[in-house]
Image (spheres, rainbow, N blue to C red):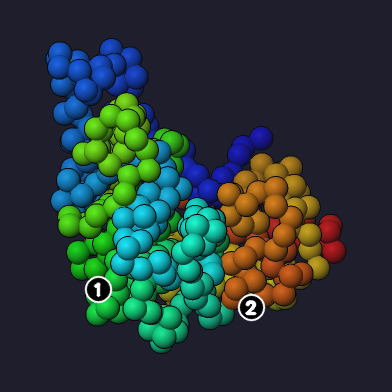
Amino acid sequence: MKIRYFDHAATTCVREEVLNEMLPFLKEKCGNPSSLYSLGREAKRAIEEARKKVALLINCEPNEIYFTGGGSESDNMAIKGIAYANSNKGKHIITSKIEHPAVLHTCKKLERQGFRVTYLNVNKDGIIDLEELRRAIRNDTILISIMTVNNEIGTIEPIYEISRIAKMYNITLHSDSVQGVGHIPIDVKKMGIDMLSLSGHKLCAPKGIGALYIKNGIKIEKLIDGGHQERDKRAGTENVPGMVGLGKACEIARIELDRSMKYLKDLRDYYIDEIEKKIPNAIFNGSRNLRVAGNANFSFKGIDAQNLLLKLDEKGICASSGSACSSGDSSPSHVLKAIGLSDDMAKVALRISFGEENTKEDVDYLIENIIKAIRELS
């Protein structure tokens, strides 16, 4: 049976060009970048070349990119790093109710350590209220952390407007852009972002590699002690193959971004139109316009989402009911609850996230089997 994969927001397959770039550093070019001999120096050069490629994608300086183990580590490094480094100035943080668990759970931990966190509401499209953000700012606010793109409903937040407010009050702005980098244009300078998290496995690089952009001049406290790797911000022997792979994936994303966005948007809009036409009681979640190209999220009233996913899986279709990081949690999605859905409707959501390998024929097959599955489960 052919597998049709529609869960690219959870993870992506490593592209062949990325794998080919990595392979030498898994085999013959195995030197430790901290070593002085030629194999070590070659690995060090490869890391710095990868750093340049990541920096080019988001328009920052190479020395503002710090490699990490993935998006969750980048979020932790940014939020805790700022909190610990600035606790003498203030202990108040602002975020939103629809952030990724890596942000929300980090904030909850900081609350247990004496910090105060304001969780902003969002409207029915999943977008924060800028006036509520202004009202939430206090004299002791040290950080605003708002995601660029939501991982469940694909909503794009008004980061540029948020950054203008942050700058007005001299507050550091962090954005979890794991779902944004490589999928929408990101320019940290134009957008006014001080810190940004990204993850390799969301843009066809391997799992276990990510990066954190830290604007020059921003001081954070490091979380991992040991050696002096990553300019003394993150100790530990570097994951050279992963870094090389992430660099290559960012290079490809930069070159192909415009074409890829149009292709995925066409697939997404076709899927949305067909579902709304053929399943009239389907409820579309999130903004139709302020949305990343590859994401579509519907709730199907009266249908158990887990059973729907199993029915689709029987037909070789991979999809999701929400964030992959929340799998195994039977509680309703915090994102869907935040945009106003009832517990029942939040539990019957189907997230489809398209990728380059998907075709219109694949989407037709998906739609056909969603309709069949709903009939069988009704």
Res 191 → quadrant = bottom left
Q: Position of residue 65 (x, y in %)?
A: 24, 46
Q: Which residue is mark 1?
A: 170
Distance from the alpha carbon under mark 2 to that under mark 1: 32 Å
Residue name at image x 24 percent, y 38 percent: 232
- Front residue of 248/359: it is 248
Q: Position of residue 96 (x, y in %)?
A: 49, 70
Tell me if mark 2 has few (under 14), some (14-19) or many (20+) residues whose alpha carbon lies within 10 angstroms of its own: some
Q: Is residue 356 left or right of 85 when viewed as pictured?
A: right
Q: Is residue 375 left or right of 261 when viewed as pictured?
A: right
Residue name at image x 28 percent, y 29 percent: 227
Type of residue at label 1? Asn
- Front residue of 311/39: it is 39
- Residue 278 visible in image: no
Q: Position of residue 361 (x, y in %)?
A: 55, 52
Please say if 206 is above or below 111.
above
Choose the circle earlier in sequence order: 2 or 1.
1
